[in-house]
Amino acid sequence: MNPEFFQQIVTSFTSAYKGLHLYPAQHPTIRNQLEKLQLRLTAHLEQREMLKMGLLEDTLFIDDHLFAIQTPATATLTQLLKQLKIEALEFHRGLTESELLNFLQLLRHRDIDPEDLEMLLAERNIEHIRLAGGNPDEDQEPRRVYGRAMTVVNEVFEDVHLGRIPCSKKAKQVVKDMAKLTMSDPHALFALSMLKSYDNYTFTHSVNVSVIALAVGRACELPEEQLRTLGLGGLLHDIGKLKIDLAIINKPGRLTEQEFAQIMNHPRLGADIAHNTPGIPPSAIDIVLGHHLRYDQQGYPADAQLHGPPVMPNIAAIADTYDAITTLRAYQRPVTPRQAISKMQEVSGSMLHPEYLKAFITSLGTYPVGSLVRLANNEIGLVTRVGTDNPDEIELKILFSADGQHQLEPHTRQLASIKKHQVVAEVDSFIKGINPVDYF
């Protein structure tokens, strides 16, 4: 499901909840709001057994989607869950409109505690809504860290937008956790870099560049301390764009010379912001200033004066390029991971550092995480994990059976070697209507 669908669930939930403060339960307005909420939840539960909604470090989530950017509806629901001290709720398949109504009526009693609420759920035969813990399973740790990074970027950008000097403390802490994850499992966070949002491109792109830069840095065997600096610079690399007219940033067509001149100024504007932010090291500022310099120094700003050798900016440029060309934009459709690699190899030695790029590509394997592949038996699977020591050792989720049937509950398969098990081709997930992130 896409973020807009989850936003609709939140809006329907809060509308029905607020409506019960104004109208009796049988009022047509309430019935209409409940019907919308029921239809949306049912649509989700037809594909999965359960939907989980709750708070993660005071940020609302539904399943694997974290609402890093708040709307009035998400703010209302967040506040409600905090007041009731509810960590998370589970909505299970079979949920009825009557259960929803009874549950929303219970939530109106804001002095109720979780233990009483659990007892009342049982007393009122509300079987398909349950209280749950807010902490996802251990294997969801990458999503928690990625979500925190999104929240941090949102806060930093909001400070800049309002003319305040941002605080680097939270950014440095989340990058520390991102670096540790990348060191222990280089593909876990990288898989989440496939999260794309056209509406919030600046936020997701900033986090993704940080994540991918960490993967490149690990492939280049940088020590953890340098990885942290690399990740921090990645988070902030486009911060200067906040000082440029949004109409230019979001323009779908070709920019005029005057507009591109403004765009070319964003590294310098960003470096000024980073320089004035306490706690940002010079090498991270170099990333902000130099991520468009190119390996052959033909980029911009041409007169950039870096604090040291351009190792960090060169790595960030690879990450920036990879995320940009794998993202759906108004003027381009995304390419697959292997297509992205091929395009990047074309500019190796000119735009991109050849040795760093080679190390990155080698670490990704023949079929990087997020690739949709066809097996010799005609099954189609999504690569969800690549071996750290042997990139040709992969884990797949089989999404289409040999006869072409879409598997609503895909099973996992381990392949010790892509050659032995005859992975014959990459499949375009865009054409197949598959969003790879739904399966991580």
Image (cartoon, rainbow, N blue to C red):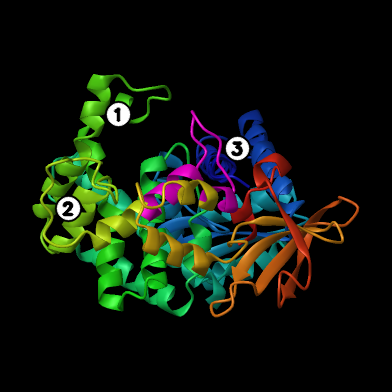
Mark nearest the camera among 2 and 3 is 2
Residue 166 numbered tag: 2
Residue type for callout 2: Pro
Residue type for callout 3: Pro
Label 3 secondary element: loop
Q: Nearer the viewer, residue 398 or 72?
A: 398
**Part of the protein shown in magenta:** 318-340
Residue type for callout 1: Leu
- Mark positioned earlier in the residue sequence (2 or 3): 3
Mark nearest the camera among 3 and 1 is 1
- Mark positioned earlier in the residue sequence (2 or 1): 2
Residue 258 vs 333, above or below: the answer is: above
Q: Residue at x 50, y 40 (%)?
A: 18
Residue matched to label 1: 246
Q: Nearer the viewer, residue 17 or 188?
A: 188
Marks 3 and 1, how far apart at CA: 45 Å
